[in-house]
Image (cartoon, coloured by chain):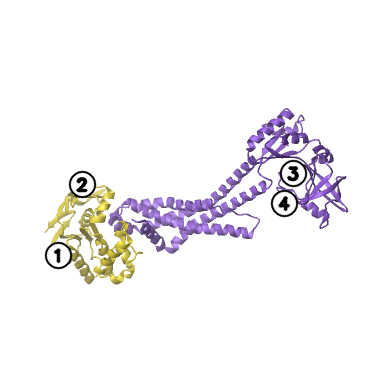
Amino acid sequence: MIHLQHIERIFLVGDEEVHALSDVSMTASDGEYIAIMGPSGSGKSSLLNIIGLLDRPDSGSYELDGIKVSELEEEQQAEIRRHKIGFVFQFFHLVPRLTAFDNIALPLMLSGMKQEERQVRVTAALTAFGLGNRAGHRPDQLSGGQRQRVAIARATIMQPSVILADEPTGNLDRSSGVEVAEILEELNHQGITLIMVTHDPDLGRRARRQILMVDGRIENDK
Amino acid sequence: MQVNDFLRYTIYGVRAQRLRSFLTALGIGVGIGAVVLLTSLGEGLHHFVLAEFTQFGTNLIAINPGKVTTHGISGALVSNVRPLTIEDTESLKKLPQILDAVSVVQGNAAIEAGSHQRRTTIYGVDASASRVWRFGVAAGRFLPDDPPRAARSFAVLGSKVRQELFGSTQALGIRVRIGGELFRVIGSMESKGQLLGFDLDDAVYIPASKALALFNRESLMEIDLLHSTNSSSTVVAEKVRKVLVGRHGSEDFTITTQEKMLDVLGGVLGTLTIAVGALGGISLLVGGVGILTIMSIAVNERTGEIGLLRALGVGRNQILVLFLGEAVVLAAIGGLAGLGLGIGGSWFVTLLVPALPSHTSWGYVVSAELLAALVGLLAGVLPARRAARMHPVEALRTE
């Protein structure tokens, strides 16, 4: 359950204040599938960053699964990100020197899970995402679709309750884009809340709920 | 995060840029190598000099006539100095802590044996000299324990004098002329080598009273005392001072304990070692700057990765630790290479110049490696802090 109330986010560009988000309120129930759409500069990425606890609102409150996360300290927010939120990025953000296996294992490793346990979980994830024979490949040896599948496997390996995807198909060709969208939707079917930022209308139409943003405000929510 | 995973992650980071990491580590390696090599040579010199000075034993006290005053003028220049005498030596021998005492007179004279003649140093000493100076007899015996004022005319030859005058022929029992007077050779000494220009092998040893007569002197040039190891040299020196002041009426002599001399010498040599080590430390500093530069570049290049780690729930502190760890690993690898370089180098120097002793002390080796890690840590602080302070959103935007 995500609950945002009167969120403001102001950036200083030179000596001019830019309202990236002004008075944004929204609620997303568990297991929802939301597409945030809008022209570039409309504040959709800013909204996603706030939901993902990568950025703090200047005012307003944010509650995630009953916790007032906007009032938490930096390190506590990191803890919440680690366990509840999975990110999928447009440019995949894989660590180039690590293999597909190690990239997927990264969150487990950082949280201190033992090697043997990691082995089991990552191997299962590799199989589930059709990467069974790519475990030892580094990102530069993988296709775009495979890279994004590795990134999604990494985002889900900690079994988060929310997946935040920022233009997940923006850097992929049509067919791999559809493939990635289907994988994300399959995860949503399993109960994970899926929030996706996109300006691709075809992708946006697949979501059950679409939020249209213009100039830092929610223009339309259906 | 588990320790082995932490190490694996940082080592992967170092390994990802092999050439760059190698060159950076090399900078630290050269620095550590220089520190180890220079301190090894310094320590070697230290050991060498101390060994030279302690070959006569360590419980020695030397008494010289005249007092060095705070005015900087030696008391020997003032005429009212009572000279040191053989009787002073005899009275000091009675002190319980004194094991042995030697009267020393030194001069130059010609020694003739048959057709050979040689000018050499003549030492007027007592029977106890070979014990006090730890000076072994090669053949025959040392001077006998005659009454000091009525010693017989015996002479003992240093190894070089014996070789020069007699070659391979028998020297024992032969009569020689020293400064015109007849002496009988009763022994010859083992080789002891040179010390600070004094050649104890190119010398002849005769009784002190004979030497006083030979050089027409009234007073001794030095009294050497050997004291027991149970009593501290300062305590003994104080007792000796009291006895001599009682005999002379005032303190017109100078007492030098070898312990004190070795302390001063050891202090000087220790400072020297640290000073050359510090010189090596300068190159270590340069290596540290190299790590600082490379880590700054690495943080720049890996901005995206830093953003990702933050998104995966890594806190600022853990980012700091990760990058500090990488700097330390880099420096420690360089340090290890430097240890090899330094130890190998000092071994090689000893091989090339055997006269130049080197002594690698493990204390320095361990502290050099710790120093390398510390340099890495300090050099890593700035870049790691920059990494930790990055805003995750901005870091992620960089690709």
Mark 1 is on which residue type?
Answer: Arg
- For residue B114, above or below residue A165: above
Category of crowding for the residue at label 2, using alpha-carbon neighbours closer than 10 angstroms: few (below 14), some (14–19), many (at least 20): some
In the rendered image of the structure, the colour used to display chain B is: purple
Quarter of the rendering containing residue B261: top right
Residue position marked by numbered label 1 in the rendering: A205
Residue sitting nearer the eye, B349 or B305: B349
Question: Dot 1: within a 10 Å radius of its alpha carbon, few (fewer than 14), some, or many (20 or more) residues?
Answer: few
The answer to whether residue B234 of the structure is visible from this angle is yes
Marks 2/4 same chain: no
Q: In the rendered structure, find residue B193 and report the number of the disc placed on it.
A: 4
Residues B188 and A45: in front is B188
Going from N to C along the chain, the mark reached first, 1 or 2, is: 2
Q: Nearer the viewer, mark 1 or mark 3?
A: 3
Q: Quadrant of the N terminus of chain A?
A: bottom left
Q: Colour of chain A?
A: yellow
Residue at which label 2 appears = A59
Check contact, mark 1 vs mark 2: CB within 8 A.
no
